[in-house]
């Protein structure tokens, strides 16, 4: 199992990348809301959604064709 597929953006697929971006945006929004003293009901559920989305992306990434892993084409 290659763990770089979980934390290295170059090894991530689009699902993981979108989920990671979503998580960061959610975190930033959360911090802004804390600073201005606002809160939203069920806001934390967004974290769960992104985590599930990321997990699914990881599964897809690990199940993608194994041939791609050995030769990397950097442009």
Image (cartoon, grey):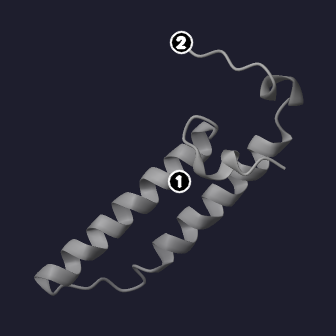
Give neighbour class at mark 1: few <14, some 14-19, many 20+ (Cα, 10 Å).
many
Q: Which mark is residue 52?
A: none
Residue 73: x percent and y percent?
Answer: 65, 15
Residue 43: x percent and y percent?
Answer: 39, 79
Residue 13 drawn above or below residue 7: above
Q: Residue at x 29, y 65 (%)?
A: 28
Residue 6: x percent and y percent?
Answer: 65, 52
Left or right: 28 with respect to 24?
Answer: left
Q: Quadrant of the C terminus?
A: top right
Q: Nearer the viewer, residue 55 or 74?
A: 74
Give neighbour class at mark 2: few <14, some 14-19, many 20+ (Cα, 10 Å).
few
Left or right: 73 with respect to 10?
Answer: right
The secondary structure type at the circle numbered 1 is helix
The secondary structure type at the circle numbered 2 is loop
Task: Tell me the mark number nearer the camera, choosing from 2 and 1.
Answer: 2
- The number of numbered discs placed on residues in the rendered structure image is 2
In this figure, which residue is indicated by the disc labeled 1? 19
Residue 20 drawn above or below residue 34: above
Task: Choose top left, top right, bottom left or bottom right for residue 33.
Answer: bottom left
Left or right: 37 with respect to 31?
Answer: left
Q: Check the image and name the residue furthest to the left.
A: 36
Q: Residue at x 58, y 38 (%)?
A: 14
Lower sequence index among marks 2 and 1: 1
Residue 36: x percent and y percent?
Answer: 12, 81
Q: Residue at x 64, y 37 (%)?
A: 11
Q: Residue at x 44, y 80 (%)?
A: 44
Task: Choose top left, top right, bottom left or bottom right for residue 71.
Answer: top right
Q: Label 2 to label 1, Cα distance in Å?
A: 24 Å
In this figure, which residue is indicated by the disc labeled 2? 75
């Amino acid at each position: 199992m290659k763990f770089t597929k979980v934390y290295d953006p170059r090894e991530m697929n689009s699902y993981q990348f979108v989920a990671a971006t979503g998580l960061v945006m959610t975190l930033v929004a959360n911090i802004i809301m804390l600073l201005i003293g606002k809160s939203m009901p069920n806001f934390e559920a967004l974290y769960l959604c992104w985590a599930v989305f990321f997990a699914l992306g990881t599964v897809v990434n690990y199940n993608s064709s194994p041939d791609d892993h050995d030769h990397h084409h950097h442009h």
